[in-house]
Amino acid sequence: MQDKKPTSFIKRTFTTLAVVAPILFGAAAAMVHIDNPDFSDAGPREPMSAQMVADLGFEQKFSHEPHPFTVRDGTKIFGRKYASKNADTVIIQLHGVLADGFQSNQFAGNIRNATNATVYSIDLRGHGMSGGKPGDLSYTDQYRDDVADIVKHVRTLHPDSKVMVAGHSMGGGILLRYAMMDDAPQVDGYILFAPLLGQDAPTMEQPNSVEKQSGGFMKVHIPRLIALGFLNIFGFDAWNHKPVMFFNLPEEAPLNTYSFNAAASMSPAHYKDGLQAIDKPLFVTIGSHDTTFNSMVYGPVVRNNTDGTFYLTEGASHNGVRHDKKAMEALGKWIKANN
């Protein structure tokens, strides 16, 4: 007689799933629709020091010319070109959270001067003067796909030059995801300033929570983030446009939230996968006074997972490292060694 136990087990399994799945989906749906956090409990924040304001980079010190790009869905991505007479190397530069190419003026100009490269400073989709919905994407990794289209276009403009990519904070995280693309247009090097390595990276381990570090400036909708991560495992992405990151800015601010699609596109799910995907020359630096990430563990993380160069910029803050003379000198030496 044929053994009916396997058939019976399969039936029980499917029966259990039929009962449990709607419960799990319902619980996830409820978590997704929990009210957004507010900042009524944040209290007044201390005014920023003159140095903190300067580190944000609003002062426009370097001249440039506009250079927009059109990406695969027809969206216009705004770029600023910082030209160099000796453009053996071209660098495409990405900004961090809530920023844009305007705030990257000094960063881009400093890179150009330190490396003699032509620099294209990009407003990411939904930021600055670029098209797209602020803080949201049509799908996960649209930032990365935009970068791929820009790299391809820049290579046609500079066929005889090396093309490298540079990113600060979130921009660095996007470039790590770019390195993981199977069909990405090849680049000749990666330059990461205080990069967002990933939520599982030891660089995220700070003595205080993100909300305490930000002084009530940022909040994360943890239940929604967890629920959407769970639902996306099963291919359900209808609610991915809901915000999961919130910033204590006026409602009329052009950008004060990031959706799940955008947040999931900012860095690798696993930091080792992003770092180990880089098979080109790599330069990483972070300021010793960075209060966003744990700067003291970056060196071991980079050395244990890449063949790249790490430079700790003494005395620099998270934003200030973009303007630091020592960091730029280290970058210039690295460029010369890899040209």
Image: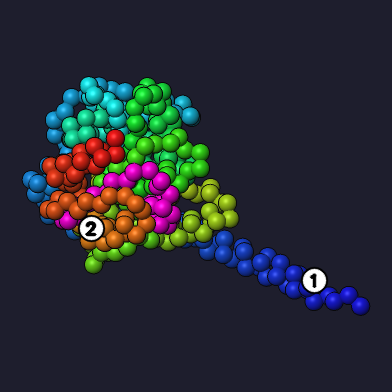
Residues 215 and 293: in front is 293
Residues 179 and 44: in front is 179
Label 1 Cα neighbours within 10 Å, binned few <14 / some 14-19 / many ≥20: few
Indicate the amino acid at tag 2. Ser
Identify the image quadrant of residue 35: bottom left
Residue identified by numbered label 2: 295
Residues 178 and 330: in front is 330
Residue identified by numbered label 1: 7
Spot occupied by residue 248 in the image (x, y as percentages of width and height): 25, 50
Spot occupied by residue 77 in the image (x, y as percentages of width and height): 37, 29
Secondary structure category for the residue under label 1? helix
Disc tally is 2
For the N terminus, give its image quadrant. Answer: bottom right
Label 2 Cα neighbours within 10 Å, binned few <14 / some 14-19 / many ≥20: many
Magenta segment range?
A: 266-290
> Which mark is drawn over residue 59?
none
Q: Is 36 part of what is drawn in magenta?
A: no
Location of residue 89 with respect to 39 vertically, above or below: above
Residue 298 in view, yes or no: yes
Location of residue 315 with respect to 253 vertically, above or below: below
Indicate the amino acid at tag 1. Thr
